Image (cartoon, rainbow, N blue to C red):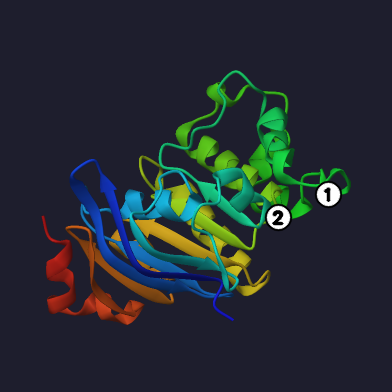
Amino acid sequence: MTTLEVEDVHLHYGAAEALRGVSLKAEPGRITCVLGRNGVGKTSLLSAITGQHGVTSGSIRFEDKELKGQPPYARAARGIASVPQGREIFPLLTVRENLETGYACLPRKQRSVPPEVFEMFPVLDSMLSRRGGDLSGGQQQQLAIGRALVTRPKLLILDEPTEGIQPSIIKDIGRALTYLRDSAGLTILLVEQYLDFCRELADHVYIMDRGEIVHSGPAEDLDNADTRRHLMV
């Protein structure tokens, strides 16, 4: 079953059209990657899926049920978790408290941090009492992913998780996403500009340009010159 299906979605900011008939699918146990230059509509697409911005027309279905009109908190309760660009952790809260903010959409009996969060990111376990703002950028990114996983998602959405992150932590994040796909069967939707990271992880790739999907295919297509031209500045 397809976890997420976006069909012919248009989205406007006033008179400006940010998404122009976008369609894509994300399936369980697969990493779907959306690539594109800055300003082509990638973050607008994620805003539409998570409910941060309403769509003008089109359909967004999650587990065969329409999401249109549902607020972000209702989508989170249904199993959609987002790791936003820039991480957006709470700098004055401790690591433990940041993780516990993920409890908001959970029933009381599920309000605990899954042990795999600390297995994938052991640095978080050793820094539970430290404030989020005292962590490095890479550690904050791990915390943001951990916070999303606390919600027990069915669909994990990540907006450029490698941005400004040191190579060693990029590898840790890659290993974590591979584990979540292969062992947990999670549906992962990844927005990226880092081509090599996407090539290594993705099962299927979409490329956006000017608010539209201009390419859809397997990750191997990223080695084709005709495909790569859509990503050139």
Q: In x, y percent, where is residue 88?
A: 49, 33
Which quadrant of the figure contains the C terminus? bottom left
User: Residue 152 — which label?
Assistant: 2
Residue at mark 1: 110
Amino acid type shown at disc 2? Arg
94 in relation to 225, above or below: above
Q: Do the residues under discs 1 and 2 have CB atoms within 8 angstroms?
A: yes
Q: In x, y percent, where is residue 57?
A: 34, 60
Q: Where is residue 108, by image quadrant?
A: top right
Question: Closer to the camera, 49 or 219?
Answer: 49
User: Residue 58 — which label?
Assistant: none
Left or right of 23 on screen, residue 227: left
Question: Closer to the camera, 182 or 17?
Answer: 17
Q: Secondary structure at mark 2?
A: loop
Tell me, yes or no, if residue 162 can be seen here.
yes
Tell me, yes or no, if residue 199 can be seen here.
no
Q: Secondary structure at mark 1?
A: helix
198 in relation to 89, above or below: below
Q: In x, y percent, where is residue 150?
A: 70, 47
Kindly give the residue lying farthest to the right in the view shown: 109
Which quadrant of the figure contains the N terminus? bottom right
